[in-house]
Image (tube, rainbow, N blue to C red):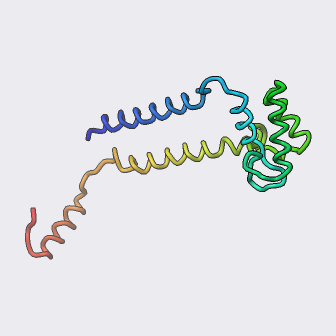
Amino acid sequence: MPARVRVLGWVAVIAASLSLSVVAAFDDGGAETDAERIERLSDSFACPECRGQSVAESNAAVAATIRQFIADSVTDGATDTEIRDQLVASYEARVLLNPPADGFASLIWVLPVVLVVLGAVGVGAAITGNRGRDRQVSDEDIELLARARSRSGGDHS
């Protein structure tokens, strides 16, 4: 396969991946119902007593209290930010399942992307590393091949 076709194929794959990523990032899926919003918010807060469980997953009493607070707040028309701020004020930052995207914590969001990009660059460099080099056969190579053929008992050209 010619190098130009191969490069165009990779460009097409990268363009399609970027396009799908952009659509997925900005597609809001339409209007969200109160029940969907309550479920999304319950999934986004951690149970203060349980390790690694969201408020939606936990059976702890405090999780039930937070779920009820979220449902009441959504019904009363509170914004996601207001609900988040109230929960953080009551339970501190440990109630956040997703770390904030600012300051030092932003590394949690940026570092995986950087590692994937560096990995892709490394794979691309490894794949194309030997291409484009001058592949001239030296006189020493020809002499070494001739000696190997004479030892093996004949000319195999």
Residue furthest toward the right?
A: 90
Q: Residue at x 91, y 41 (%)?
A: 90
Front residue of 110/100: it is 100
Does 36 sit left or right of 18 as displayed?
A: right
Where is residue 110? Give x, y as percent: 66, 41
Q: Residue at x 58, y 27 (%)?
A: 27
Front residue of 2/149: it is 2
Where is residue 83? Give x, y as percent: 83, 33
Q: Where the C terminus falls, by quadrant?
A: bottom left
Where is residue 41? Give x, y as percent: 75, 37
Q: Where the N terminus falls, by quadrant?
A: top left
Relative vertical location of residue 46 with respect to residue 4 in this rendering, above or below? below
Q: Residue at x 83, y 39 (%)?
A: 68
Front residue of 47/106: it is 47
Give the number of marks: 0
- Residue 14 appears in which quarter of the rendering? top left
- Residue 147 appears in which quarter of the rendering? bottom left
Relative vertical location of residue 46 with respect to residue 70 in this rendering, above or below? below
Q: Residue at x 73, y 29 (%)?
A: 34
Where is residue 86? Give x, y as percent: 88, 35
Does 117 sit left or right of 151 as displayed?
A: right
